């Protein structure tokens, strides 16, 4: 299995120099909140208002059960149109209405304003379930819905240019350290960092194996403890509800819309572009 994994990663060459820092990790204080997203609002606008109300620096949202009206999304693509980057986004796809079966979103700042990055799964009860990257300013909320926010103080996901990949994406950065003992952390991982390898070390201060893991990003193929492997070098992925440092369970979609899920094997989930995550101690 390791040879196959290494063979996949060896096929990836990013356009820029390898960054010296591979794990951007920021400790802080997290609290669990319920937020109401109102029918008819644009998702990004509704979330921005709630972030202002919560008064936190950043957040992870769990959008399971959110009803959408008209919505747009993209899927992964291997290679960019300009031939520079190793991956890009598909053409925009649209839908009229659906309910998200599972969705993880990180909320931070882009040019000082609130910004949202969300990967989701929907239409699971149809012959053609779908998954991808929702475009937050092109998604309308279909009905009032309460969702969970893990509000975080002490660090922010900040939209940042990255020389190695030639993308701009969220990077975990510290803000003003909060009072009290940290009970959570946010982090962003650079290309080729293996998700299963890094999680126990990152989670050690926050309950170790008992910590909860929430994240989204992309990986270079994936091999699971059960079920078929994802061979695609490009993907959109998000953690499943039972994810933990010792049980890194992912849902993945490849450029053809094929869906994969399961618990990653050691060495079997190297990051392609980036991976954003929050680890929280038990009881948060």
Image (spheres, grey):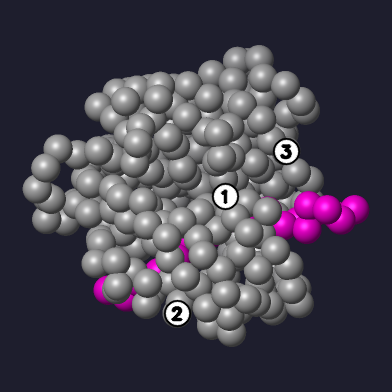
Q: Earlier in the sequence, mark 2 or mark 1?
A: 2
Residue 214, given in percent of the width and then of the height, sits at 46, 43
Q: What residue is pinned by disc 3?
A: 260
Q: Residues within 10 Å of mark 2 (few under 14, many from 20)?
A: some
Asked if one can make out residue 174 in the rendered structure from this viewpoint, the answer is yes
Q: CA distance from mark 1 to mark 3?
A: 21 Å
Asked if the magenta segment contains residue 182, the reply would be no
Q: Can see residue 162? A: no
Extreme residue toward the bottom, this view: 40
In the rendered view of the protein, which quadrant contains the N terminus? Answer: top right
Could you tell me which residue is drawn at 86 percent across and 56 percent down?
A: 126
Q: Quick one: label 3 or label 2, which is nearer the N terminus?
A: 2
Label 2 element class:
helix
Residue 231 at x, y percent in the picture: 72, 34
Q: Is 148 above or below relative to 110?
A: above
Q: Residue at x 58, y 40 (%)?
A: 240
Residue 110, image x, y percentages: 34, 70
Q: Which residue is mark 2?
A: 45
Give the quadrant of residue 227. top right
Q: Pointer 1: what residue?
A: 86
Residue lying furthest right in this view? 127
Which of the two marks, 3 or 2, is nearer to us in this view?
2
Query: Could you classify mark 3 by the number of other residues whose Cα lies within 10 Å: few (under 14), some (14-19), or many (20 or more)?
Result: some
């Amino acid at each position: 299995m390791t040879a196959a994994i290494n063979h996949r990663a060896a096929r990836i060459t990013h356009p820029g120099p390898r960054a010296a820092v591979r794990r951007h990790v920021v400790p802080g204080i997290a609290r669990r909140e319920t937020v109401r997203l109102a029918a008819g609002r644009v998702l990004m606008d509704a979330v921005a208002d709630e972030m202002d109300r919560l008064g936190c620096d950043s957040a992870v949202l769990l959008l399971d059960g959110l009803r959408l009206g008209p919505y747009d999304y993209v899927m992964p693509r291997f290679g960019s149109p300009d031939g520079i980057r190793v991956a890009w986004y598909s053409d925009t796809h649209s839908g009229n209405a659906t309910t998200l079966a599972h969705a993880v979103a990180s909320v931070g700042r882009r040019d000082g304003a609130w910004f949202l990055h969300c990967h989701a799964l929907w239409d699971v009860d149809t012959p053609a379930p779908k998954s991808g990257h929702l475009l937050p300013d092109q998604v309308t909320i279909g009905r009032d819905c309460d969702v969970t926010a893990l509000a975080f103080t002490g660090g922010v996901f900040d939209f940042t240019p990255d020389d190695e990949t030639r993308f701009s994406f969220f990077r975990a950065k510290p803000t003003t350290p909060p009072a009290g003992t940290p009970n959570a952390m946010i982090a962003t991982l650079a290309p080729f960092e293996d998700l299963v390898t890094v999680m126990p070390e990152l989670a050690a201060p926050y309950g170790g194996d008992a910590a909860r893991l929430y994240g989204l990003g992309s990986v270079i193929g994936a091999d699971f403890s059960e079920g078929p492997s994802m061979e695609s070098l490009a993907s959109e992925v998000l953690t499943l509800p039972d994810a933990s440092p010792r049980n890194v369970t992912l849902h993945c979609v490849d450029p053809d819309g094929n869906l994969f899920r399961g618990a990653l094997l050691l060495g079997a989930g190297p990051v392609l572009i980036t991976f954003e995550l929050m680890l929280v101690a038990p009881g948060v």
